Image (tube, helix red, strand yellow):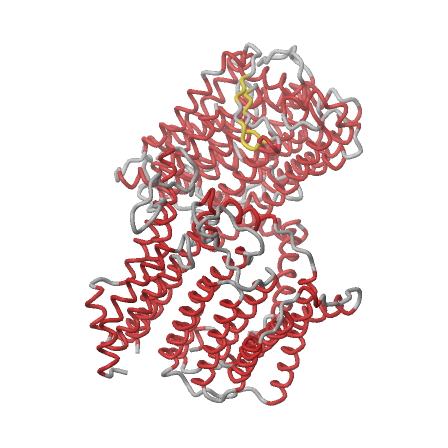
Amino acid sequence: MLLAVLSGFFVALGLPLIIKVFKGPNTLWVSLFPLSLFIYFISKLPAIKDGETLSSSWAWVPSLGIGLDFYLDGLSLLFTLLITGIGTLVFVYTSSYLKGHIYLDRFYAYLSLFMASMLGLVLADNIITLFIFWELTSISSFFLIGFNNDNEASRKSALTALSITGLGGFFLLTGMVTLGYVAQEYQISALATLSEEIQANALYPLILVMVFVAAFTKSAQFPFHFWLPGAMKAPTPVSTYLHSATMVKAGIYLLARFTPILGNHEWWNGPLIIVGSITMVYAAIHAIFRLDLKAILAYSTISALGILVFLIGLGTDEALLAAGVFILVHALYKATLFLVTGIIDHETGTRDVSKLSGLNKVMLPVGIAAILAAISNAGIPASFGFIGKDLIYEATLHLGNMGYVLTGLAVITNVCLLFAGFLAGIKPFIGPLPPAFSKLHLPPATMWVPPLILASLGMVFGLFPMVVDTALIKPIVSSMTLGTPTFELKIWHGFNIVLLLSLLTIGSGIALYFILKPSEVLFAKATRFEKLSPESAVNQFAKGFVSFSSKWTNFFQNGYLRYYLITILSFLSLLLGYRLFYGVEIYVDTSTLSDITLYEAVIVLIMAAAIFFTVFSKSRLTAVASMGVVGYCFCLIFLFYSAPDLAMTQFSIDTLTVILFVLVLYNLPKYLTLSDTRDRIRDGLLSLIFGALISILTLEVMNETVTKDITSYYAENAYILGKGKNVVNVILVDFRGFDTMVEITVLAIAALGVFSLLKLRLKSIEKE
Amino acid sequence: MEILLVILIGLLYAAGIYMILRRSLVKLIIGLILLGNGANMLIFLLGKIVKGKPPIIEATGKALEGLYADPIPQALILTAIVISFGLQAFAIILVKRAYKVIKTDDLDEMNATDEDL
Amino acid sequence: MKTLIFKTASNYLLPLLLLFAVFILLRGHYLPGGGFVGGLIASIAFVIHSFANGLETTRKIIKFHPGFLMPVGLTIALVAGAAPWLFGMPFMTGLWMDEPIPVIGLVGSALFFDTGVFLVVIGVTLTIIFTISEGL
């Protein structure tokens, strides 16, 4: 299992290379990778069906309780099958959709990276590992959404998606750390037994808020939903994979996974029901006014996610069952519709639903897939969607008085969703074929087969629900409720109120479809409300923040180096000065100091004079020479005070520096005094103050007793361990050899920099 | 002697800072070098200076014994000296190249972006 | 600066200084010296020579661009650091021969590492100075 999860990362690394080597027009073979993972996971199906769970673990950071622990139960199995199954189809689809794209290799690498992260997320059994994979999905989806990186809108929506989901990631981390702290347990499978203690803890509400924000941002719940329509700038395979079937369901997965741990509490149920129902109604109504096929699908996806959050919020066994079924139903029909939209876009060049019709005549198999998906979406009897919708109504109806309101909301949502599904799945294919499209032909099989498979599965599961009943659905519910479920999926429940509601939904949806024609006018009316949406609030905030930042920056970043320095130094001087004058007593223990011999005093005097000349000389050569004198005096001081190595090095370096200066300064401009007297006095004062502070500070530090543990360690072991007698050299080449290694690398880089700076100059002059 | 060195450090810092506050790029580099020297001296002084006892194990000995100069600041300074040489060389070349391109070494004339050149 | 005395002297100084540089490098582990200082001294030797005889003459003596010494030195240092891996020890563990070699003394991986440093320093210094002299 560990290998299955991690293989995606290796594949992502190696794939660009492999594709470059096997430069062929056909990249269909890449799909073998997700396919093999799909087969691997489906082979686990019988075991899970019998109520077993599989786990594997590998210690990663044991000291922090973090391990690559993976755990496969009903819930994660459903997700792994969706991820790898739809993943395979998306890989196949991509091989035609992006055929010949120059960055196709990169695209596959991102897809594999994403798939691996997603697998890790749904299989993780450690809450910190869960967080890490959660973040990895955010990051890899950033690359996928921004895949067309030469398009500004695409970059912007990638950034929006990353900021929103990344924000959620922070919340998740906080939530998980708090949870781990409260429960003293990081294993998800073990946390469920501690659920009562966690819910009694005072930090429980905090954990809830954190988990909610994380899930809502990832699964595009109101008011964080707006990144999802924006993310539709991504290539269609990405929209299909991330934004219908997998990534947006990560939030749902999180909620479902934590239902046995945090759920069954009014603080858990209430907010989920409220947010879920707002989202489902809000987005469903939005969906019916869109013209862009992808926008319609995006909003209907948000609405479907709202339904799922809502169902998890209800928390009854029936609702959880409905959620489990609906995840599968939705993934199947929505992925189909996205893939179909991709084909339409690819072939006709437009996604405007008001311009599309009659495509059945030129691409029948695509049309069949789309219509089947629309049927499943509509919940027309005999489709899998019908079962899903039935279960939703059943779950809401059994809630007593409040249930009627919620059922009403569910009906409204479903009517709008049905309309949206018809718009996306049926409208483009029926009616007269516009002459502009008459020359179109069927795309390659790799493009139309994947949606057809998904759509047919929706029908097969609908007609024969027993196929998925015990194998998939029951284990899901039992992993959410920790009990053994006692129901059966059926097509026919007899004549009852649920059936009536279903028929009502279908009837009014179809009626709506005939009444409401998509048009620019309606779209314009709907967009007028955009100003009030959370998206524009966030945009306004971002704009305000940017303008504030630019004002702030312009004030401080004025482009004059010395003003920066003056600001920093004045602040530092004030801080240091304050501390030194209040609260620190300065005394010097003269007994420990060494004597001043005559020649030392002379050297210090020479240095002082040399410094003076360096600063105030009017001639550049004098300044450089004086600086050299300062360096040579340093040499002597090092020599007096037992540092022969330093003396030698300083001597050589000083010589080289002066040579360098002389070589370069030969033809530089006149050495002028550029600043006026007032500036010089100001700078001089500041420098003197700072210099004095440094002196005082040095005196102060000298009085501190320094622990010499490291020194004595080196002194004792230099010969024993390093076999050397020059301790300084042993430190450089042995004890701290790694530092020296890096240091010479830095030196080499500096030399390369010098070389390229001058060679570049020569070349540019040659060009002229 | 320490007192003298402390004063010297203050002097080096003051001179270095004064120089980097000048408008000329050449003075800026000289200032950086002076500052670097000051910092080296500071580290050297804080390791407690000792006369005539280099951190070298005697030919017959196995470890440093008695009073000896601290090898750690020395190793640090040695590294710092060599690295600062690389830095200086790079900075000097930058000045030279900047002067070639924009014909000035006045920092105040350099705060325009490259489009304005 | 191309006086006759300087020119003649520099011709003798170059091998002497180089020898001295190697000497400083080798004794570095026991007495003051080491790769850094040795490399710097060797560079100064070449720089003096180039001042006296012109850059081209010095170039001819070195035969290849000093820049190549940088990767060579880095590789030697890295190999010296990585050699302990062969013996199942961590990176940068000191390895030593049992018996000292005459003149050079006890040889260990640290000496090779220091030689790497020595070469990089020569490469860096000469690349910088030669490049600048050329640019004039």
Q: Position of residue A620 (x, y in %)?
A: 45, 85
Specify the quadrant that holds the C terminus of chain A: bottom left
**A254 above or below C124?**
above
In depth, the one of A506 and A74 nearer the eye is A74
Q: How many discs mark residues in the rendered view?
A: 0
Q: Residue at x 27, y 66 (%)?
A: C16
Q: Report the side of A429 relative to A267 (left or right).
A: left
Q: Which residue lies at the image location 27% right of the left edge and 39% below the top edge?
A: A21
Of the pair B99 and A323, the residue shown nearer to us: B99
Question: Is residue A361 at least partly visible in the picture?
Answer: no
Image side of residue A95 versus residue A281, left or right: left
Residue A195: image x %, image y %? 73, 23
Tell me residue A153's x, y (percent).
49, 53
In screen coordinates, is A123 left or right of C19?
Answer: right
> Against A464, is A754 above or below?
below
Q: Quadrant of residue A416?
A: top right
Is residue A177 at all visible to an observer of this figure?
Answer: yes
* Residue A43, x across and y down, in percent: 45, 16
In this view of the protein, which residue sits in the foreground, A739 or A527?
Answer: A739
